[in-house]
Amino acid sequence: MVEDISQQSLSEGLTTNIIGRNIVYYPSVTSTMEAARQAVERGEGEGTVIIAGRQSAGRGRIGRTWLSPEGGVALSVILRPKMANLPHLTMLACLSVAYSIKAVTGLKTQIKWPNDVLINDKKVCGILTENDLRGNRVRNSIIGIGINVNISIKDYPEIAGIATSLAGETGDEVSRVDIISSLLAEMERLYLTLPDRAEEIFHAWRDSLITLGRNVTVQNGATTYEGMAESVDRDGTLMLRDKAGRLKRVVAADVTTG
Ligand code: BTN
């Protein structure tokens, strides 16, 4: 039987005060990013979480699609951070996913720059952050999180070589209610530490990156660079040392290990 992840069954176990106090659940939706945008226009408040049983047009970073069948977790969180806290949102989202997977399944994860969560070098979660900025003010920030929970990856040849799922790793079904509850609790805990503990969030994220110190290929559209992933800036920018010894700043791209 498919586990019920509707608003009612999630609300019971929720320990948060802001994130997830208002949950909007759709059995099926195009993308929770679109649904979150509509929720913003309706005037839904900070901490509103849009959750979908499945998405028919899930979106990934840099124009990619995100496969989102029944059995996964697909959600978007609406936040209204201060401008100075913006770079830390994706970092804290990555960490929250990692901590919740560890807490619920015991599995250890790594982070591939900037925000892919991996298990044994295979992607288990992707994060997409979209910000609506007005001048030097953040109108809202929508953090979309997709986790492969109870998905049989071998049924999806297009991702079979690069992705994994929690059920695939543990050999058993994993409760999506537990994952979502833990994830929202971790997100709120870290979010409320900003800006005072931004440095700690940055360090924890940086120390979990498997990308640093590796030779990588960095691709964004038609642009490709190769080099050594040397370090990350406090705003999350990747510093890449190219073959000619020049240091390049990479803000958004897909990184593969070469
Ligand atoms: C990536 O790795 O490229 C980011 C994937 C982000 C997927 C999530 S699933 C919930 C939310 N809705 C979407 O359409 N995308 C994000």
Image: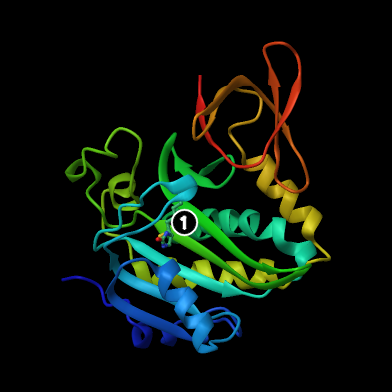
Q: Which residue is mark 1?
A: 101
- Placement of the N terminus among the 4 image quadrants: bottom left
Whether residue 10 is visible to the viewer of this picture, yes or no, is no
The outermost residue toward the top is 244
Q: Secondary structure at mark 1?
A: helix
| Of residues 39 and 204, the one drawn nearer to the viewer in this rendering | 39
Is 39 on the left-hand or right-hand side of 89?
A: left
The percent position of residue 211, horizontal first and vertical second, equals 59, 31
Q: To which quarter of the image does residue 141 belong? A: bottom right
| Of residues 173 and 244, the one drawn nearer to the viewer in this rendering | 244
Q: How many marks?
A: 1
The outermost residue toward the right is 196
Q: Vertical placement of 95 versus 178: above or below?
A: above
At label 1, the amino acid type is Ile
The percent position of residue 105, horizontal first and vertical second, equals 41, 56
* Residue at x 66% of width, y 41% of height: 251
Is 217 on the left-hand or right-hand side of 179?
A: right
- The quadrant of the rendered image in which ligand 1 is seen is bottom left
* Residue at x 26% of width, y 37% of height: 160
The percent position of residue 87, horizontal first and vertical second, equals 71, 55
Q: To which quarter of the image does residue 19 belong? A: bottom right
